[in-house]
Amino acid sequence: MTSPTHDHAPVPMTSAPVSKLNGIITVPGDKSISHRSLILGTVADGQTKITGLLEADDVMATAKAMQALGANIRKVSDTWLVDGIGNGALLAPSAPLDFGNAGTGSRLTMGLVAGYDFPVTFIGDASLSSRPMGRVLNPLRESGVQVESAGEEDRDLLPLTVHGAPLPIPMTYRVPVASAQVKSAVLLAGLNIAGTTTVIEPIMTRDHTEKMLAGFGANISIKTDEDGTRHISLVGQGDLQAQDITVPADPSSASFAIVAGLIVEGSDITINNVMLNPTRTGLFDTLLEMGADLTIANRRNSGGEEIGNIRVRHSKLKGVTVPASRAPSMIDEYPVLAVAAAFAEGETHMLGLHELRVKECDRLTVTVEGLKANGVTCTEGQEDLLVIGGAVKGGGHVATHLDHRIAMAFLVMGTAAENPVSVDDTFMINTSFREFAPLMSELGAKLT
Ligand code: S3P
């Protein structure tokens, strides 16, 4: 079984400087919520109806995986229907689950199947096959999961097979890295384990899994210590009820147009219906500190999340220090923040970036290489990045290493640099934001 992200022909693209960006756009649905809607819909009783689902490769890989585990998933008009099979009722898939490039889909599904006494094999593309899975498998092993891997050196790399225990044991797990994927995998495993599974989260990460589990009727409770440590407890083997879900627009996708609007002179753009969950909005806080003319109108609630319309106008940004404590709320936004920082006056120092090294590529090194290729002065530390802002020469060719966000960030750079910026491959943008090039072009970007 292959996925479109395996062995594709590269699709290079160049972004040329433009005089202004203008317009009102809507970006597609949030990737994190889309994965979770399909997963929870699968183990709920009844039919879950999802509108605004992100129809990108990563999420479609999760949809296929959920079908292989027994759900009936289809799109009727603009609504995705998931006929759930009920909690505890997953079927053993007859073939490996191919997650392509999708870290979230694969890791959450490893958790989902960990409470089942059958083997599930996970495969993915070259990027996913080099990403650490031990962070998810180690806690799952505490419940009795056996892992078989072909890898000789690191046994926790894809391809691998997860086999839950006949009588899995509930876990109490203190998450050692700030990772919503690890938290979510453990909680999803707990769904089919008798007893109470508890995740202790010292540093809060995106909270979609716990909010949505509660929305589906799971027996879940959260206690927060004075120091902010969260104890999330789930009583396993309860029933989940199908839900109607409206997926809000993805703030991580919105961030590319937002930064482009800030760095291109004369720009004025609005992105509608963007999710404003505070565990996701660290980039917006940072841009405001940098002096961005960024305003949010029509804040309202939609399906349990706050959303709003974000308007940005070209701004003279200044460098700031971005504290390590903010990293979890903007973990996917550092490549595009680095681009904003390159155009800002003075130094921007980003701290606490160790997790960037295990994303779709080593995003810290690859961002630095892209900045340097375009004449930006910057210094890469083990866990930090210092960018000296000013005029950006551009003219560079950026190697994207199968990373959609690297491709989009440097195409954004090209809109305002002195010379066009090229990226070696835009194919991976399909994993999260197929509409990126058409929407940016609609605003006035020159992408060829
Ligand atoms: C995600 C969590 C984050 C993020 C990823 C989506 C999620 O990963 O980078 O794009 O939906 O849970 P980590 O949990 O590894 O930080």
Image (spheres, rainbow, N blue to C red):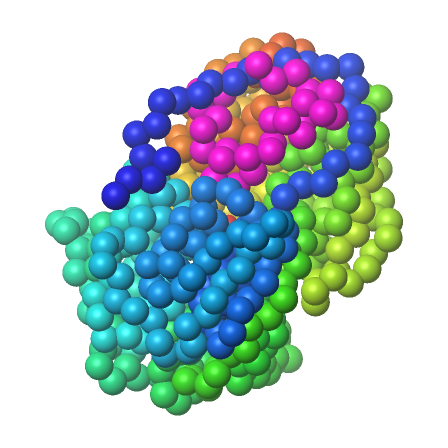
The stretch drawn in magenta includes residue 433: yes
- Identify the image quadrant of the C terminus: top right
Does residue 268 show up?
yes
Residue 283 lies left or right of residue 430; in this view the side is right
| Residue 186 in view (yes/no) | no
Image point 67% across, 49% down: which residue?
249
In this view, the residue farthest toward the bottom is: 195
Q: Nearer the viewer, residue 153 or 245?
A: 245
The N terminus - image quarter? top left
Residue sitting at 62 percent across and 50 percent down? 78
> Residue 2 appears in which quarter of the rendering?
top left
Query: Residue 74, image x and y in percent?
Result: 49, 54
250, 130: nearer the viewer = 250
Q: Is residue 78 above or below residue 163?
A: above
User: Residue 314 at x, y = what percent?
Assistant: 81, 28
- Residue 266: x %, y % from top left: 84, 22
Closer-to-camera residue (65/342): 65
Residue 352 belongs to the span the image colors magenta? no
Of residues 25 and 90, which is closer to you in this image?
Answer: 90
| As drawn, 90 above or below 20 | below
Which span is picked out in magenta? 422-448
**In this picture, residue 321 sits left or right of residue 432:** right
Q: Residue at x 74, y 61 (%)?
A: 302
Q: Quadrant of residue 143?
A: bottom left
